[in-house]
Amino acid sequence: METENQIKEVDTHLLDLRYSHTRIKNDKILVTLTNSIQAYGQIVPVLAISEQERYILIDGYKRLAALKACGRDCITLELTDAEEHDSLFTLLAQNNERKLEAIEQAALIQELHGRFSSSFSEIATRLGRNKSWVKRRLDLIESLPEEVYRAVMTGKLSSWAASRILVPLARANEQDCLELTKKIIKDPLSTRELVQLYKHYGKSNRTVRDRIIANPSLFTKTTKEQDEKKSGKQLNEGPEGKWFKNISIVCHMLKRLKATSEDVLYPNQDKHNRRRCQMWLSDAESLIVELKKEAEVTA
């Protein structure tokens, strides 16, 4: 028979905050919680387990920070009889309600795997996931340089930027990752700007990459100006300009096909490939004839 968890109020100095490093600091959420507690008090108890004369805080680190910001030294907690590692599993399994960031999940999984020797298979099974998901979560932490990880956990960088941009960048070039982190902490970029920067970085040579990393804000500003100029030009030229550009692209492609035709059209060629070539050439010819007719009719 299951027993109900005990609700009690204790002094905050009795809390063991051994999992504080697994939570990301968020000033906006802290302000919201602080205002709520000042107005209505602590409504939802934090979750803890008892250990000798102290209480290990499992969930509720943001509420604790808000209570301290209000100058309160007592906290209402819900005591669970579950084992410590079981409590961590429960917290992770309830993520839809708790809304843990991906890196916070990764930090808790690291605790389960490292401190409690839980295997990837056990973690995956108990969380209703597969081992690949567990490994990907751990990789978020293991792939990030320590300085970048600390920046995320202290709220200087978003978890999204870390997982989508900085993790893959660190795998490719750790030094570039560190440099970019320093720059965007000092001069933050929007999500759209970071995505655009990373795309350009991926397809650029070393010289251009160095320029991007050296001054990401200047890069995004220049790119934005170029995009606006291009958009203005397209608007000015209208559909005719776009059509002329497309037909010029077709002509250039046809020139490249002509230059390489000897490589694909030759005596004693396989009949199947020859028929395919003839079919596509016939289709292209038909389309060009139709366009010419339309141009003559509307002249």
Image (cartoon, rainbow, N blue to C red):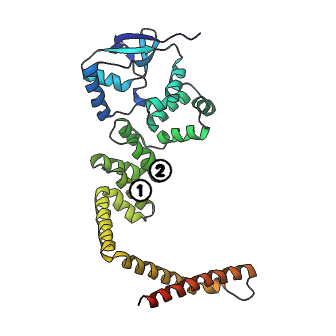
Residue 242 image offset from top left, x and y in percent: 39, 76
Q: Quadrant of the N terminus?
A: top right
Amino acid on which disc 1 is placed: Tyr
Within-10-Å neighbours for mark 2: few <14, some 14–19, many 20+: some
Disc 2, disc 1: CB below 8 Å? yes
63 or 296, which is in the foreground?
296
Residue 122 is situated, as x and y percent measured from the top left of the image, at 62, 29
Badge 1 crowding class, 10 Å Cα cut-off, few under 14, some 14 to 19, many 20 or more, is some
Quarter of image, res 29: top left
Return the mark for residue 168: 2
Q: Which residue is mark 1?
A: 198
Judging depth in this view, the residue of 264 and 114 nearest the camera is 264
Q: Quadrant of the C terminus?
A: bottom left
Nearest the camera: 74 or 144? 74
Identify which residue is drawn at 45% across, 43% down: 144
Q: Earlier in the sequence, mark 2 or mark 1?
A: 2
Amino acid tagged 2: Pro
Where residue 28 sits in the image (x, y, percent)? 29, 35
**Eyeballing the image, is 3 above or below 84?**
above
Question: As displayed, is residue 216 above or below residue 66?
Answer: below
Can residue 191 be seen by looking at this rendering? yes
132, above or below 189, in the image: above
Residue drawn at (55%, 83%) of the image: 287
Q: Residue furthest front?
A: 297
Task: Tell me: 76 left or right of 258.
Answer: left
Q: Closer to the camera, 184 or 265?
A: 265
The residue located at (72%, 89%) in the rendering is 267
Tag of residue 108: none
Q: Secondary structure at mark 1?
A: helix
Can residue 270 be seen? no
| Image position, residue 278 (x, y; %) | 66, 84
Q: Residue at x 43, y 25 (%)?
A: 19
